[in-house]
Image (cartoon, helix red, strand yellow):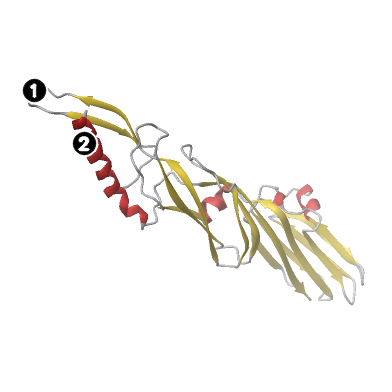
Amino acid sequence: MKRIGAILGIVAFLLLITAGASATTWLTYREDVSISSGTVDISLTYWHNQTTTTTSRNITLPCQLGQLNRTVSKFAIKANGGNIVYNLTVNGVAIKSSQAVTDGNWDNVTLASIISGGVSSSDTYINFTFNVSANTNIIKIVIYGNDSALTSTWISNHITVKEKDVTTPEVGTSSTSAFWTVNDSITVTNSGLGYALSDINLTLSYPAHKISTPASYVTVSSLSNGGSAVRYVQYQKYAPYVYKVDDNSEGTSHEVIVYIKSNEVLTN
């Protein structure tokens, strides 16, 4: 038994040496936290005044179109100094054709009417294409969303999770006898949209062998266009353990096979 105990000690020591580098390096192959879902706030206003030629405004979204506020989000046009007639196409669908607006009045086309007019609520962009008969117009485009659900594609393409060891993994004698502490970094990047995001809330999912779940979500209050933000989550996981020992020693021949089970790859 002393021989087996000594061998186990050597195995544990070798594992610690191998895992030691992960205490200073951010790793991407670990069983770390994942982002199961997220929400975001969007508030945009665009002005197009005195427009006569065909004009387009394309807005890429981190959410589906139907996640935006369907009343506040709108295309609004005012006849300002004379009567006008305009045409509006949204995402390739004709929403208004030869629509007249008398001087001094607004014509509001809400997102609700745009979707009911045939535009898919699952689109992840909105493209307004319009023209007006005279330059006596004021055009206001509003895009607004509160707690709009991020698409899984946006999460996958714009969020990166890495892990670093805070304490060194030890080899336990059972599946729950040893643990170690890790620190996960969650980097959120706002690229490809052309505008700022606010109140990004990300729901966390932990690996099955976690011990603690100190935070159920992380928040980024604001993220500028092209900017990035990092949030950290520190928690504990069950460490590798010895689940089987075969002692094949006979006489002066000594052979001990130690089987160690780990819930994840600790090093690459």
Element class at badge 2? helix
Residue 237 seen in render: yes
Give me the residue at 53% from left, 56% from top. Answer: 158
The amino acid marked with disc number 2 is: Ala
What amino acid type should be assigned to the residue bearing mark 1?
Gly
The residue lying toward the viewer, choosing from 72 and 212, is 212
Apparent side of residue 54 relative to residue 237 in the rendered image (left or right): right
Q: Nearer the viewer, residue 16 or 141?
A: 16
Quarter where residue 252 is shown: top left
Q: Residue furthest front?
A: 2
Residue 10 sits in which quadrant?
top left
Residue at far left of view:
252
* Label 2 Cα neighbours within 10 Å, binned few <14 / some 14-19 / many ≥20: few
In percent of the image, x 79 and y 69: which residue is there? 139
The crowding category of the residue bearing disc 1, from other C-alpha atoms within 10 Å (few below 14, some 14 to 19, many at least 20), is few
**Of pointers 2 and 1, the one earlier in the residue sequence:** 2
Instruction: Please give the label number shown on residue 6.
Output: 2
Q: On screen, 74 above or below 31?
A: below
Relative vertical location of residue 99 with respect to residue 184 in this rendering, above or below: below
Residue 132 coordinates in the image, percent (x, y): 79, 69
Q: Position of residue 262 (x, y in %)?
A: 36, 37
Q: Is residue 52 visible?
A: no
Q: Report the residue marked by disc 1.
A: 251
